[in-house]
């Protein structure tokens, strides 16, 4: 069975109504990144950071998977599919995708501030001041903030190196180290980028490009893959 590795970015979630900080000149829902998405921000003002992510979490809970997410689930009927995502939402999982690796964390989880291995799933939108892990430490969003290591980078590289098809969806290719994953796609793999802004990106020459939104372009390429390989 052919292996399809999907690398997804903010563009796929944007069609479900989830905004990114790149939508407004470095602001994320009118917040400066350094005020809400760095270790320094957490040390300076935990209340602000918790409130910011509580709002983002509610936004994710209200959002629904779109046709691009659902098309990737259909792909699993015919291929071995691994999704590597820069997104912190759970829309891939809610659509039904079964192999999803989050590079930048997961908004619907919290973790201990003293032991990063203590991770808890959230059923509600809020993490409050005083919500603690089993060691008595304040919980923080399970997010990789700017300036922190990306712990899932190594497994993401290993998965990328096994691709028969490497499909990139809705990413600016501007956030590193995540964007470097394209360099690990095998030479003989079929490589496709789906993004309406692809013309402005420094994409490798061995990638074919679909200049469409995720909701339009992903069903198109998946139909092509099924016709080609199944």
Image: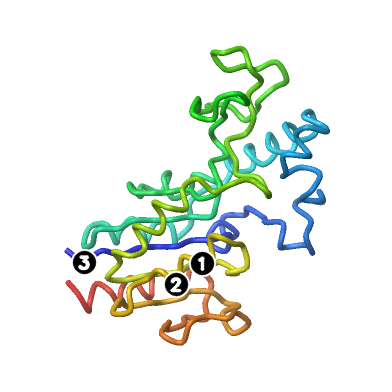
C-beta proximity under 8 Å, tags 1 and 2: yes
Q: Nearer the viewer, residue 15 or 164?
A: 164
* Relative to 218, residue 55 above or below: above
Whether residue 140 sits left or right of residue 12 in the image: it is right
Question: Rounded to the nearest whole Å, what is the CA distance between mark 2 and mark 3?
Answer: 20 Å
Residue at the image point whose x is 63% and y is 53% from the top: 18
Query: Which numbered disc, 2 or 3, marks the residue closer to the eye?
Result: 2
Q: Quadrant of residue 156?
A: bottom left
Residue at the image point whose x is 72% and y is 57% from the top: 21
C-beta proximity under 8 Å, tags 2 and 3: no
Q: Residues within 10 Å of mark 2 (few under 14, many from 20)?
A: few
Q: Could you say whether the residue bearing mark 1 is in a helix, strand or loop?
A: helix
Across and down, in percent, residue 216 comes to: 47, 72
Question: Rounded to the nearest whole Å, what is the CA distance between mark 1 and mark 2?
Answer: 6 Å
Q: Could you say whether the residue bearing mark 3 is in a helix, strand or loop?
A: loop
Residue 183 got which mark? 2
State which quarter of the image contains the N terminus: bottom left
Per the image, the residue denoted by label 3 is 2
Per the image, the residue denoted by label 1 is 180
Across and down, in percent, residue 138 comes to: 66, 20
Whether residue 144 sits left or right of residue 208 in the image: it is right
Q: Residues within 10 Å of mark 3 (few under 14, many from 20)?
A: some
Residue at the image point whose x is 59% and y is 84% from the top: 199
Question: Rounded to the nearest whole Å, what is the CA distance between mark 1 and mark 3?
Answer: 23 Å
* Relative to 81, residue 190 above or below: below
Across and down, in percent, residue 20 comes to: 67, 56
* Relative to 205, residue 102 above or below: above
Q: Quadrant of residue 11?
A: bottom right
Q: State the colouring used for the structure image.
A: rainbow
Residue 159 got which mark? none
């Amino acid at each position: 069975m052919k292996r399809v590795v999907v690398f997804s970015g903010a563009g796929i979630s944007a069609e479900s109504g989830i905004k990114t900080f790149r939508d407004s000149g470095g602001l994320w829902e009118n917040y400066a990144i350094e005020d809400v998405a760095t270790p320094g921000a957490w040390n300076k003002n935990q209340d602000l950071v918790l409130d910011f992510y509580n709002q983002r979490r509610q936004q994710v809970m209200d959002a629904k998977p779109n046709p691009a997410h659902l098309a990737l689930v259909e792909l699993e009927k015919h291929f071995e599919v691994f999704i590597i995502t820069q997104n912190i939402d759970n829309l891939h999982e809610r659509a039904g995708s079964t192999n999803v690796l989050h590079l930048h964390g997961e908004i619907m989880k919290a973790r201990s501030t003293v032991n990063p291995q203590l991770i808890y799933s959230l059923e509600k939108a809020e993490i409050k001041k005083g919500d603690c892990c089993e060691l008595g430490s304040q919980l923080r969003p399970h997010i990789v903030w700017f300036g922190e290591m990306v712990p899932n980078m190594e497994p993401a590289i290993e998965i990328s190196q096994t691709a028969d098809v490497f499909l990139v969806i809705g990413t600016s290719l501007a956030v590193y180290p995540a964007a470097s994953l394209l360099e690990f796609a095998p030479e003989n793999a079929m490589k496709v980028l789906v993004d309406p802004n692809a013309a402005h990106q420094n994409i490798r020459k061995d990638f074919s490009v679909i200049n469409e939104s995720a909701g339009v372009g992903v069903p198109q390429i998946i139909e092509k893959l099924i016709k080609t390989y199944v």
